[in-house]
Image (tube, grey):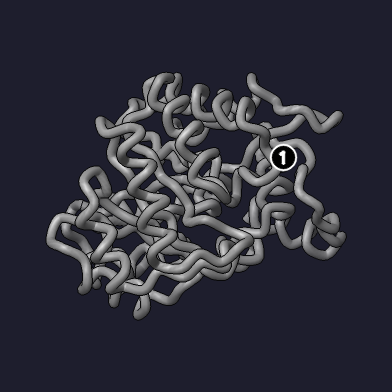
Amino acid sequence: MTELVCAPITPFREDGELDVPGTRALFEAIRASGVGAVFTPGTTGEFTALDDGERMAVIECALEVFDADRVYAHVGAATARQAVALARAAYDRGATRLAAITPYYQTAGPVAVAEYFRQLTAAVPEAEFYVYVFPARATTTVSPDELAALADIPGIVGAKISGLSTEQVAEYIRSVPEGFRVLAGNDVDLVRLAAVGGAGVVSGVCGVFPEPFVAAAAALNAGEDAASFQPAIDRAVETVGGGDIRLLKAAAAMRGLPAGPARVSLDPPTEEQLATLQAALEG
């Protein structure tokens, strides 16, 4: 089965505060669109700009809308100490599937990464953990062989690999044990990833352009050829700059979904980008 998981934006009010009712409404809209799971709050959800209480509020909203096994509650942090506290808090709120980005900003080596995940799994042994690998943003690299070693830690059942090509993700899939679930963060590769044995895609773009992603995932899970949906997926991803938070928020607002401003420091979209978005949504 190919799983389509949305990595949603996080709605904020115009004063910059977290929009909790808007977050819940956004999750409801995502579920109504046919997307069956969420990974939140992740990179697209501006987790680095949320305090710990806000991260729990987002996770609570997700759990109110989706079943626990459909919520990848992201608890990763720069330190094991903070990640452990977040993992315990998320589990106490009902989250059973936890994801954690590798330590970031300060580059962690394989020994430090393994210790980070051992502390997490020991803190919440009842939960399933997913290793979130995003070298371009975290600066920490986990090789396919190193991921295979992490898979030996009890409680680690899968991984999300972002910022790497399908060919590179395929190397991770070949290296890990059978049954270890590898999701990719490259929206555009939903169809291609299924062909190399991936478990699915975590997509920020499907939060605002769900139609081609939902249709492609349904076709794949029915054993049908999904190649015909690839051009529409390509156009959707290109329209939002590959998952640019500013453009995703602008597209969400154009669709009448809760969005608000970005909290991370980004230049606003250009008039040309906004016109392209509007045309795509009307097309």
Left or right of 202 in this view: 236? right
Residue placed at 24% from the left, 66% from the top?
148
Q: Nearer the viewer, residue 283 or 212?
A: 212
To which residue does mark 1 refer? 253
Q: Nearer the viewer, residue 11 or 78?
A: 78
Residue most toward the bottom? Answer: 167
User: Is residue 232 in view from this perspective?
Assistant: no
Left or right of 61 in this view: 195? left
Residue placed at 38% from the left, 28% from the top?
95
- The type of residue carrying mark 1 is Ala
* Residue 224 found in image quarter: bottom left
Count the marks.
1
Q: Residues within 10 Å of mark 1 (few under 14, many from 20)?
A: some
Vertical comparison of 39 with 138: above or below: above
Secondary structure of residue under mark 1: helix
Q: Position of residue 239 (x, y in %)?
A: 64, 63
Residue most toward the left? Answer: 178
| Image quadrant containing the C terminus | bottom right
